[in-house]
Amino acid sequence: MKERSLRRHQEFKAKRKSQQNYNSCIKDLSPSERQALGNNLEKLRKVCVASHFDEQAKKPVKKPLREMKHDITMREQLG
């Protein structure tokens, strides 16, 4: 019984924390859009992930060191 109540409490805390994270993620939305989302975690997650994905798409992709070395050796072989 004690384990079940502890697990429920931990799930509640995790849900509340994720709600706060998602709400902080969608600060730029208009109040009407926020109200439409409500506290539905699935909708909040989708909106937050979509906005985060847009930010990542704008960042230039940096190649790993191994790929950069490979590109240099290929240029040397071709040149």
Image: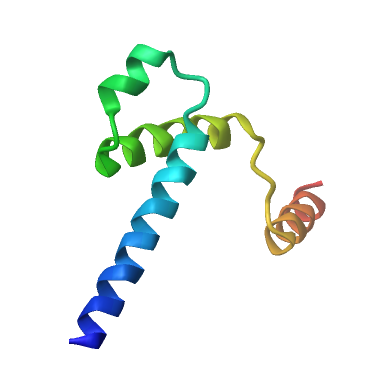
| Closer-to-camera residue (35/48) | 35
* Residue at image coords 24%, 77%: 5
* Residue at image coords 35%, 41%: 45
**Residue 40, position as x, y percentages in the image:** 25, 38
The reply, left or right, for residue 63 in relation to residue 37 is right
| Closer-to-camera residue (50/68) | 50
Which residue is situated farthest in the left direction here? 1
| Closer-to-camera residue (29/54) | 29
Q: How many marks?
A: 0
**Residue 38, position as x, y percentages in the image:** 28, 30
**Residue 75, position as x, y percentages in the image:** 77, 49
The quarter in which the N terminus is drawn is bottom left
User: Which color scheme does this rendered protein use?
Assistant: rainbow
* Residue at image coords 77%, 55%: 77
| Closer-to-camera residue (28/78) | 28
The vertical placement of 5 against 29, above or below, is below
The reply, left or right, for residue 60 in relation to residue 49 is right
The reply, left or right, for residue 54 in relation to residue 35 is right
* Residue at image coords 34%, 12%: 32
**Residue 26, position as x, y percentages in the image:** 47, 29
The reply, left or right, for residue 37 in relation to residue 59 is left
The vertical placement of 31 against 74, above or below, is above
